[in-house]
Amino acid sequence: MRVPGLGGLFRWRYARPLLQAPLLVVSIVMILHGLFGPTLAPKNLATTLSWLHFRGVLVLVLLCAGNFFCLACPFMLVRQWARRVFRPRFNWPRALRNKWFSVGLFVLILFTYELFDLWSSPWWTAWLIVAYFLSVLVVDGFFKHASFCKFVCPIGQFNFVASTLSPFEVKVRDQDVCTRCHTKDCIRGRREPVSDLVMIRGCELALFQPRKVGNMDCTFCLDCVHACPHDNIGILSRLPARELMVDPIRSGIGYFSRRKDLAALAIIFAFGALLNAFGMVSPVYAVETWLGRMLHVSHEAPVLGLIFTFFLIVEPILLLGLAAWLTRIWTRSSRALLPLAVRYAYGLVPLGFGMWLAHYCFHFLTGLYTVIPVTQNAIASLGRPFLGEPRWALTGLPANVVQVIEIGFLVLGFAGSLAVTYGLAEDDSPDRPLRAFLPWAAVCLVLWFASMWLMLQPMEMRATLMSG
């Protein structure tokens, strides 16, 4: 925030709409091209930008900076326009003020992605984007604050978990300034003195800055920055993953160790990374064929359902349950197995993020330049080929170069999980940290070997002309 030029941009009240507007235009172009453009996925902007470029850029930005996609989210720009006409009247139901609903949607998107081969269908991809816009309008049209972002959005939940590993965080500079502040504008919003009308809104995700810890649930919207009358909030550097090793009470969240829904989100984030990659390597077809014969079914849905059940329910229960049981025995802990599993589940986040990075960057980097001929072709189809003829030979970086990068991400994720897990063990069992650490290190090692095996398999070049 103190960088010349950049700080001024982020302090400007209209910085967010300025960043959202180009992405809204791109989203509209993707919808139109997906519905009315070429049906071949590698020649359509909807599939190329969604499944190659957006996902790769997203994880790299999360790794290097933070949750800046949510800052520039085009869905929120449309929502703000709609709220000028329709004012939400209801509070989000208390029973749903957790992550269980969004965890289910996260799994549903992973499932439909595989079942309907979304990467190969521009039409379905376009309708998925439309459905996202409509969902935002419906949820935030009825419910106050940022209910969609906090409790519904699957992309947002992915970003929240991944951003716990980011090097930057929106936080206060000086706690003493907040102690002396009596208006609490960062959460209440800056108000007009006489009428008490909100002139600049505060945090809609219920994160009170003086007690906020880490990036969980933070969309980097910077509303708190604009509302703070003391210029005491900034985007500050911090140690990545540090927030996963400690368990203070967090504003708007509570204690990580008591949030089973957040632990489930972390588990789905980690194991879902392996599952998503498994769907793109050749052994999956042998497994699906074998299961189809065993179940005597020809439809893919029940087979995929069984695979998802194993990867996201059975495998985590077995691995985490065994690790929690060994931890309880070796450390002579009186804690039940479920609280132990919840406590240490956050140690899997770096490993999961390493897998998402390796997987998404494989597609992004091997198809890095494909957006150029697809854009050329889209413009040429309008009868004005001012960008020239499509250069379909443009692809991306060589696969052997990308593989080195993939392995680097997996090693980085493995090291991060070991560091977080050991930090949790030291905090949880200061007299026997090694005994508490070893079972979870073994889980990390198993998942890392599985990740390495997956990324060393030939992977489908989805949404590119090389996929044929």
Image (tube, rainbow, N blue to C red):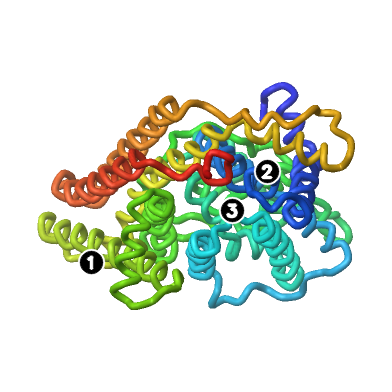
Label 1 sits on a secondary structure element that is: helix
The answer for how far apart the CA atoms under marks 1 and 2 are is 51 Å
Asked whether 427 or 453 is in front, the reply is 453
Q: Amino acid at mark 3?
A: Ser
The structure residue drawn at horizontal position 74% and vertical position 44%, both measured from the top left corner, is 23
Asked whether 411 or 391 is in front, the reply is 391
The structure residue drawn at horizontal position 71% and vertical position 27%, both measured from the top left corner, is 6
Label 3 sits on a secondary structure element that is: helix
Residue 326 appears in which quarter of the rendering?
bottom left
Q: Which residue is mark 1?
A: 337
- Asked if the residues shown at circle 1 and circle 3 are in contact, with their CB atoms under 8 angstroms apart, the answer is no
Image x and y of residue 267, in percent: 38, 58
Image x and y of residue 138, in percent: 73, 70
From this viewpoint, is residue 211 visible? no
Tag 2 or tag 3, which sits nearer the N-term? 2
Asked whether 269 or 29 is in front, the reply is 29
Tag 2 or tag 1, which sits nearer the N-term? 2
Mark carried by residue 120: 3
The answer for how far apart the CA atoms under marks 1 and 3 are is 43 Å
Image x and y of residue 229, in percent: 74, 42
The structure residue drawn at horizontal position 39% and vertical position 55%, both measured from the top left corner, is 275
Q: Amino acid at mark 2?
A: Lys
Front label number (1 vs 2): 2
Mark carried by residue 43: 2
